[in-house]
Amino acid sequence: MLSKSILCAAISVLAATPLRAQAPCEQIRTACKNAGFVQGGPIGDRLVLDCFNPLVFGEQPKRASRPLPQITPQLAAACRQRSLARQSPEANAQLPPAGRSALTAGDGGRTVYDARLAVTWLADANLAATQAFGVPNINKSGSMNYATALRWVAAMNAFDRGAGYLGHNNWQLPTAPDVDRTCGLTGRHSESFGFKCSSSALGSLYYVSLGLREPDSAVPNSQNRVGLFQNFQPYLYWSKSAAADPRQGFVSFSFSTGFQGANVFRNYLYVLPMIKDKLPGTPPGSGSKLQANPGGATVHDPISQVTWLADANLAATQTFGIAEINRDGAMDHETAIRWVAALNQADGGHGYLGQTDWDLSETGPPDPSCSMKGTTGYGCIGSAMGSLFYRQLGLRQGESVIPPSEARVGPFYNVQPYLYWACSGPSASSPCLPSGPGEGFEWNFSMGNGFQGTNLVGNALYVMVYYPESSAGQPAPNRPPSQPLPHN
């Protein structure tokens, strides 16, 4: 029973912001905000995991640092039903009774039962970083290409003389239906993609069970130092260059793996502005290594002959009046163009740091150093970001600019704020189908922003797995990747 002081605090919290005009879930989110919980905040103060999920789904907050606001059971039930309205009929039929958590830890915290999907997840969202099961070609960070992911899952199922890892031999990749009415976009092969795709297994986990909202990352953005830079995000960054196929959007570069590909303009990626050549008035450089300019706010790259902003995620703290930037600094491509323009117009037209030539980097013509056709693949040192990653930061294919995340998200741990592999399948309990949504492509889901799309099977992504509740299951067939198309 709530104490009188906590009850009074809850009543005052609810009075702080009018709630009745909002939808049920927004009322609860507002109550959590008024109580002091913060989206993406520290453990104990997290809006979703420490307040929203306990109130809506009956999950016990493990380390809440403050009293939860008081809401009515009717409001929680209404929000719970709305949260699941985007799910498929099958998923709705698996709704847990009111008061029961959709996610239940088991096996001493090593597994998580998902009542909505009737599957049991492995709690370690990056087991491959520490347990390869003898499978080669897994990157040190735990990422891998799709063919390796299939082999790794098969090795999990063959573990312990066929008994399987943790005593289960029907582990599989999460599935995604080719047609999903909860998605907002349709691809060239009629596949559904985009934000809000909650009918896939990973989409259900992100949007419904964990209560996250696009384009927020499941893991708080990273604050770090990488050589002369700070705040590099282990994710995708926009370039200025259009993809070879206009339908694929714009060229992007991954500072999580060193892969250069393309993303549709609606996706949310990060931005690292640059200026061509060396800044006027700065000391003359020597050698080929990165050189910090006076004050340390910019970094000159003598190889690519560009000057980078030293803060690789400045937009997270300085929006320059551009409202569409997400709180973690990510943005769509159109917003990236406007944000860079705002840098040039800052300080009454004198420009940010006194410079008015800020721009997004370009990739240039087809690059023979790329591992795939055109400007796609690994090793693309012809682009400014590729040169920075491989030549100046000394990273290799499959390496991340910062160490892998050890973040806990609900009952999961080692969650990576990046892309995860998925496979085609009509439901969470169905096995992976032998062919993907397009030749050379398979499904992926971003725990970095909630975007579901397709990816070249030769790219390196992370792997989460589960086993279905009622299926004996077999490992997904080990099919070799088809020849990929220049698309990310």
Image (cartoon, grey):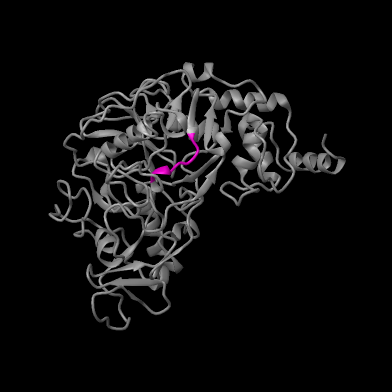
Check the image and name the residue furthest to the right: 4
For image coordinates 32% across by 82% down, the residue present is 281
Residue 127 colored in magenta in the image: yes
Q: Is residue 232 above or below residue 94?
A: below
Quadrant (top left/top right/bottom left/bottom right) for the N terminus: top right
Check the image and name the residue furthest to the bottom: 283
Residue 192 colored in magenta in the image: no
- Region of the chain picked out in magenta, as a range: 122-128
Q: Is residue 354 above or below residue 56?
A: below
Q: Position of residue 456 (x, y in %)?
A: 25, 39
User: Quarter of the image holding residue 302?
Assistant: bottom left
Q: Judge from the rendering whether residue 248 lies leftward or rightward of residue 126; answer left or right.
A: left
480, 452: nearer the viewer: 480
Q: Is residue 287 above or below residue 58?
A: below
Quadrant (top left/top right/bottom left/bottom right) for the C terminus: top left
Q: Position of residue 61 (x, y in %)?
A: 66, 40
Q: Judge from the rendering whether residue 143 lies leftward or rightward of residue 212; answer left or right.
A: left
- Is residue 180 in view? yes
For image coordinates 17% across by 52% down, the residue present is 370
405, 148: nearer the viewer: 148
For image coordinates 56% across by 20% down, the residue present is 95
- Is residue 217 in view? no
Q: Position of residue 220 (x, y in %)?
A: 51, 51
State how many labels appear.
0
